[in-house]
Image: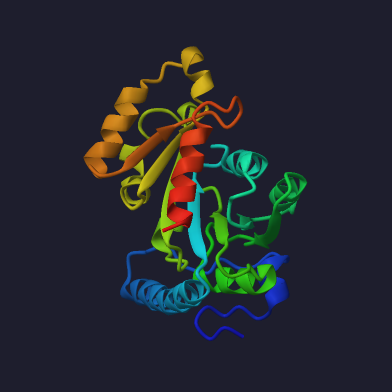
Amino acid sequence: MCGHCGCSSEKARLSEPGIERHSHLQQDGDSLQLQQALLAGNDELARQNRDWLTENRIICINLMGTPGAGKTQLLEATFRGAGTDWPTMAVLEGDQQTQNDARRIQASGGRAVQINTGTGCHLDACMIQAGLASLAPEPGSLVLVENVGNLVCPALFDLGERHRVAMMAVTDGEDKPEKYPHLFAGCELVIINKIDLQPYLEVDLDKIKASLRRLNPRVEILPLSASTGEGLNAWYDWLLTRARL
């Protein structure tokens, strides 16, 4: 059992519904202390994950974003577009229920382990530790984590990853960075997907970019369409650059 977060078995972490592993802040001191204790325990497990990943020269990227932004579709396209000179890749898929996304990755030629969180709204370091044990990525590989679709809680939990990427779609509207600043400000890359739909929407892409740069002047912004392929080469270049550092 993980003494920090109460995970009772690898089976529960990887395939069975679990319990929510953090309490949202309430207006009393006990809840605040509980939140701080759980985050501290998570941070220690994240440090262990990071040390293990570094020791094995594995680059881990935490992909977070809105439900329906196209995270899984982007990963499918990544496996289909991978060249023979790419590092070995594998995916940890986070969802509350089903094996759907892991099956999609596998159908695209990738290795994937599904982590179901039950009522939980995010992945945590304990789940990632169990997922890595099951996935067993080879040294020098690239591990992509698709976090649960949510713009709040995933940003609070360090998983031990090397890089954080946020993903939204033009269909989400212009105000998502302003409404959820913590997630977008903490990522080095923001992907804006579904730009092929922009002509049919009243969405100003420049306004989204300006909001993102107010939050983080050094953020990289990558508009693309995982459906049509527009912008995917820029994503591949970004990914390979980080994988080879």
Residue 151 screen position, x and y as percent: 44, 47
**Farthest front residue in view:** 85
Residue 46, picture quadrant: bottom left
**Residue at 50% of width from left, 51% of height from top?**
63
Q: Nearer the viewer, residue 26 or 215?
A: 215
Residue 8 screen position, x and y as percent: 65, 81
**Residue at 62% of width from left, 44% of height from top?**
82
Residue 203 shown left or right of residue 95 in the figure: left
Which image quarter is the C terminus in? bottom left
Residue 227, picture quadrant: top right
**According to the image, what is the colour scheme of the structure?**
rainbow
Residue 199 shown left or right of residue 92 in the figure: left
Give the number of callouts: 0
Q: Nearer the viewer, residue 205 or 7?
A: 205
Residue 84 shown left or right of residue 124 in the figure: right
Residue 91 screen position, x and y as percent: 62, 56
Residue 78 screen position, x and y as percent: 60, 42
Viewer can see residue 84? yes
Viewer can see residue 152? no
Residue 196 shown left or right of residue 151 in the figure: right
Which image quarter is the N terminus in? bottom right
Compared to residue 22, the image places residue 168 above or below, namely above
